[in-house]
Amino acid sequence: MIMEIVAEKKPKNDERKAVRVSGAEALILSLEHEGVTTIFGYPGGAIMPVYDALFDHQENIHHILMRHEQGAVHAAQGFARASGRVGVVFATSGPGATNLITGIADAMIDSTPVVCITGNVFSPLLGTDAFQETDVVGISMPVTKWNHQVTSAEEIPDAIAKAFYIAKSGRPGPVLVDITKDAQVNEFDFSYKTCEGIRSYHPVPALDNDKLKEAADLINKAKRPFVLFGQGIILSHAENELKAFIEKTGIPAAWTLLGLSALPTNHPLNVGMLGMHGNYGPNFLSNESDVVIAVGMRFDDRVTGKVSEYLNNSKVIHMDIDPSEINKIIHADVPVLGDAKESLSALTALVNENSHEEWIQRFRDCDKKEHEKVIKNELFPTAGVLTMGEVIRIMSENAKSDAIIVTDVGQHQMVTSRYSKFVKSKSSITSGGLGTMGFCLPAAIGARFGAPERQVIGVIGDGGFQMTIQELGTIFQTDIELKILILNNHYLGMVRQWQQLFFDKRYSATEMVNPDFQTIARGYGIESKKIEKREDLESGIKEFLNFKGSYLLEVVVGKENNVFPMVPAGCSVAEIRLE
Amino acid sequence: MNEEYTISVFSENHVGVLHRITTIFTRRGINIESITVSESEIHGIHRFNIVVSSTEVLMEKVVKQIEKQIEVLRAFFYPLDKIIYQEIALYKLPVEAVQNGTSIEHIIRNNHARILTVEKDFLVVEKTGHKQETQALFDELKPYGVLEFVRSGRVALSKSPQRFKDYLDAPELGKRNTDEEVRELAENN
């Protein structure tokens, strides 16, 4: 059923033939022109005409009634990240609009294309403190790529066309269009034209061949080159180009949290995860590289550690579509602006075939050390409390090979990212930059609609689960099949880990006294089980994954287990700790 | 070391652009010393002049963030020696100030100021110049009882031979590409 509803629909050709319709009807027609088939939203007074117009279009547009507007944006994000299309959100004015902000901020920092449509009060009432009136354009301005208020029906088609163009072009991001109620109800002669350009906006910088040559020269001479890639690879569909580039040059490649799954886990040149809880080798050896090729990543502080002690011996080639990322954190010796797909394929043509066996051996040696000190005990413990690592290992071994794993924020997120195995791109969806607890459950719902043919597994901590737990209602109502794996350590684990390591074990406000999750799941008609013993784990996970329908599996893991390796905040990546 | 920089922004004349630009400064804790906005030589394109005290490194980043805004066509930043700039100040004085001898006349003459209007109770003096100059006149007039004083934000033009229209006519140039170009522009302008 879902398959039918969200099946890819080609945008209609521009039809300039005008028809007389209300602004609300024009909005829905505009969305249809943009190929929208799925909307996540929540109705309310100021957007009622839009919902009324939607009523006549239910065959083409599937509206998913979320349980909170924040959930609607996260679902739209999950949809966008799983499908590569634009996620669409409806919300009403006032609290509906302000509830969107966390999700919009998350989409902004993680470059996710989302179009939010909010209703607002009649335009003469703007600024009068009318019921449910708020300045959503003002509030959302710092966290949107673009936003705009529409006060007349005639403006709607152009505003929507522009919104979609801006959201998905260049470095994607969230946009918000606020439509006053009079603009929704007034009638005008509708016609639609997709946006093909804006004179003040140049989403894709032109490739600079001189820079590419400079980059190629550096790469050809490099002894210890190192590729760092981020979500830019996924956003520009450059997975094959990345692979071709590293295979030709023989350069080891490490990923940021959001770059995860752009390169298969088992690729011989995939040396693992960057960042605070990334792998030992990629962190420790960063500062030994002589040339770094950073593609579609932004040198987040969780990746760089102490910036003044990061890549001091390397020449940095920074490839990004967004000029403002160049020299923002790390000086780029050779900036290469442009779309990653285009840049990488042009660069691959200029570089020599090469191999760096000795250098790669260094990563393998580091892996061995990490395996001995951390991974072995985390993934294959034989006694004691259950570890998050073994749960994720068994989950990953038994999940479908192209399963989408959605995570929340915290220890479980790091463990899942470290130990899940991926073969297909767009398989990991998580909140990276903003670190939004509560992201997983609604984002997993969105991913389910974005990629209905794929298995979707949400891995959540007991804390984050309760931040958007209301979205169980959305699962119930839409009757989708979603696997929810709760790793319950009865703590806000990541904060507790920091308290243990850096605050003398003073566990201030991190212990969670949790409800019975099975009872809650039952209330929503969701199958559920709790596992506390190692001998029940594998069979429990198999049952969970093979079940037809949604299933909530709670696994009770060690209360005071920690995630290692770890680059303590303010330390150099070379100071990464294994214990 | 902080230095005074003037940022020129060319943008579409749309609601909210000012807010978008100012939040870029707010977020980084940069105080705006003065700001002026008006239509440029091209109809429909507005020019902002923003004066801040900051560093070159930070200015480069801020200008790129400003250029990233969808409705901004281009943004540039200049140190003081790369621009021609003015401010305007108005001084309201009690009419008695001119009734006692000729000293006010001298002050106005020496400062190349002028009297805009003389009303029954007050007169308004106007002076354009740099901040030090308008401030100097204020200090001189102060003993005569300045009733009100206002100084505008800075208006500034770059010394560059390049016109903004050249950028606009060559959309293939796109927005600024690299930091080298930022530096080059700052240096050449």
Image: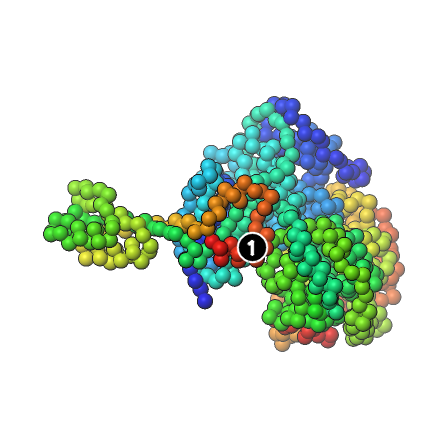
In the figure, is residue A103 to the left or right of A273? Answer: left
Residue B13 image offset from top left, x and y in percent: 48, 40
> Which residue appears at 71% of the width and 62% of the height?
A217
Task: Give whichever of B158, A485 is nearer the camera.
Answer: B158
Q: How many marks?
A: 1
| Residue A440 in sight here | no
> Which residue appears at 80% of the width and 55% of the height?
A244
Residue A484 image offset from top left, x and y in percent: 77, 54
In the figure, is residue A135 to the left or right of A189? Answer: left
Locate the N terminus of chain A by quadrant: top right
Residue B67 image offset from top left, x and y in percent: 54, 50
Q: Is residue A476 above or below residue A4?
A: below
Q: Quadrant of residue A578?
A: bottom right
Locate the C terminus of chain A by quadrant: bottom right
Task: Give whichever of A99, A195 is nearer the camera.
Answer: A195
Q: Residues within 10 Å of mark 1 (few under 14, many from 20)?
A: few
Chain containing mark 1:
B
Task: Give whichever of B9, A216 is nearer the camera.
Answer: A216
Name the residue that disc number 1 marks. B181
| Residue A163 in sight here | yes
In the figure, is residue A439 to the left or right of B138? Answer: right
Q: Is residue B73 above or below residue A221?
A: above
Q: In the image, what residue type sits under mark 1?
A: Glu
